Amino acid sequence: MAKETSFAAKAKEKKKSTQSFVKYVKSVMSKKTGHWRFNEQMIGIDEGENLDGALKRIEDDMMALDMELQSVADPK
């Protein structure tokens, strides 16, 4: 009969994540109503990175994606 793996052994085998997640809440004024709205998003922060660095990285990724989409949509 084969030996079964215990839950503790399975949990130990799993790879530890080097990324932690924080909830980022951004306040924006609604164009429609003029009231404040709160946008929430979960942001993954790499080990040794602070929130400002993570936000800058996400903003750079979005700008690069935006540039790629514009070049594809507007062939010259």
Image (cartoon, helix red, strand yellow):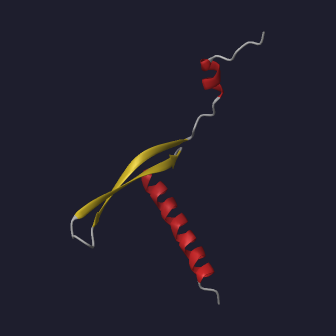
Which percent across, then down, holds residue 52?
Answer: 43, 56
On screen, residue 71 versus residue 48, left or right, reads right
Q: Quadrant of the N terminus?
A: top right
Which percent across, then down, holds residue 16?
Answer: 59, 34
Q: Residue furthest bottom?
A: 76
Residue 49 visible in this rendered orientation of the protein: no
Residue 68 visible in this rendered orientation of the protein: yes
Rendered position, 59 above or below 66 = above
Rendered position, 2 above or below 19 = above
Point 52% across, 66% down: residue: 62
On screen, residue 61 versus residue 31, left or right, reads right
Q: Residue furthest top?
A: 1
Point 63% across, 34% down: residue: 15
Which percent across, then down, holds residue 19?
Answer: 53, 43
Rendered position, 42 above or below 26 = above
Rendered position, 29 above or below 75 = above
Give the camera-side residue of 2 and 76.
2
